[in-house]
Amino acid sequence: MALIRDSGNIKAGDGVVTVNGWVQDVRNLGGISFITLRDRHGTVQITMPKKKIEPELFESLTRLSRESAVSVTGEVKESNQTALGVEIIPSSVKIHSEAASPLPLGVVDKVNAEMDTRLNNRFMDLRKPEVRAVFELRSMAIDLIFEAAAENGFVCVNTPKIVASGAEGGSTLFGVDYFGKQAYLAQSPQLYKQMLMSAGLDRVFEIGPAFRAEHSNTNRHVTEFISFDGEMAWIEKEEDVMEMIGKLIDRVLRGLVEKGARQLEALGKEIRVPELPYPVLTYEECLKIAVDAGLPLKAGDDLGTEGEKIIGDVMSSKGHDLYFIAEYPEEAKPFYIMEKPGTQYSYSFDLDFKGQEISSGGQREHRYDVLTERMEKKGLNPDDFGFYLDAFKYGMPPHGGWGIGVDRLITKLLDLPNVREAILFPRDLGRLSP
Ligand code: AMO
């Protein structure tokens, strides 16, 4: 029986091995032919001196179309002509599935395909090592989030994604017909993670899908994203939450640098780990920076993409890629955020990464009466939120939390031009398939 090897662990002295992969390239030079066989880890060369190979085998190997899925068995030989230092002299091949041609998308061609063509043929796009590397790093980041959250006493939860009321504003709700009743796809786990604070779990986190009927077609908005939410009880101030986020993100960044070296190299990227604590600017300070830079903003206005970018540039020039923007006007924040007494501000924050929001959070309003008042002020009917409000009637600790867009975190971390680069099968205004 031949050993099963891949391009990551094959070595001289292995004897006869079988390697599974895709035919990246076939070069037939007459007397000798070569196949570059690609697998998840890289490529290995199959060398076929015509005289030493069965004519039938030589014929079937040299005729293979690019990207066909095959298993090649043969002897491993040392070679100073290949990057791995070995080559395989084939003795048999199993052709599992011959690729049709032309290919919908080149895997190794240097021509940059349009994003739409790539997404329409994502299975093929993902065969590119630099595209696959993004998702391997994303997987590592999620593993690291689980580790970091557990180390800090967070309990992993799963909350419903078909819900009766939205928490993040009516304009981005996707309606669902739920056996004749009006239901929605969850925009966030907000209401449920807060209810769990009253349940005594103290610290919970969730990594799950969030749905927003976003009508904006931008490079950072999609209609389905993955949110890393956390909520913690018994906090004294929103800074407690910011400190925790810093701790968790720092752990993830350090872990990626340590574990993701191969993937980062495939991508040609480096991760810069900023020092803790991440600086905190107030909304007012940011507004001033944006206005001084020439943006026509007035008190209370959204900083907007442009404003965020200006602040990002200022902070990056000081060596701060990650920073908080705190104390937003209460009017700009949802009902569940606590107001800062005697001001028009709130105990809320965003975490921005090089000029783009990747997270928001804050201290929550845990006092039943104030919370219902705030709902009414925001034009909501507390009766529609009875299941949520009940949890505030019988002993709700002070609490706060955050939602981090995992896709945006990966996008900014790897300096990708579009959030869709960090999502396998993105959903947006114009895309429901594949
Ligand atoms: P918010 O609505 O700011 O807050 O969302 C939190 C984070 O989720 C990401 N995000 C998105 N990513 C891609 N496409 C979108 N359309 C999109 N919308 C949001 C962003 C954003 O910072 N419940 C609160 C969080 C909290 O207070 O705990 C919430 O959902 O990275």
Image: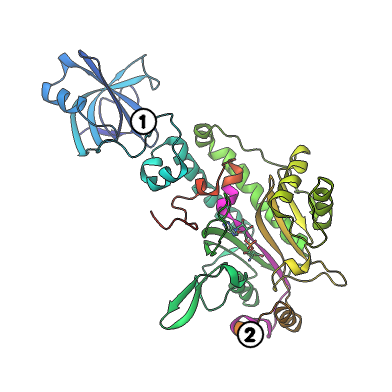
Of the two numbered discs 1 and 2 on the same chain, state the one appearing first in sequence: 1
Position of residue 38 measured from the top left corner of the image (x, y, whole percent): 34, 32
| Residue at 42% over, 47% down | 119
As rendered, which of 273 and 16 lies closer to the eye? 273
Query: Element type at marker 2?
Result: helix
**Disc 2 packing (10 Å; few <14; some 14–19; many ≥20):** some
Position of residue 37 measured from the top left corner of the image (x, y, whole percent): 31, 29
Q: Which residue is mark 1?
A: 7
Give the residues in magenta. 386-410
Q: Which mark is residue 238?
A: none
Q: Is residue 238 above or below residue 63?
A: below
Q: Which residue is mark 2?
A: 390
As rendered, which of 181 and 26 lies closer to the eye? 181
- Marks 1,2: beta carbons within 8 A: no
Is residue 392 a member of the stretch shown in magenta? yes
Position of residue 60 measured from the top left corner of the image (x, y, whole percent): 16, 28
Is residue 319 a member of the stretch shown in magenta? no
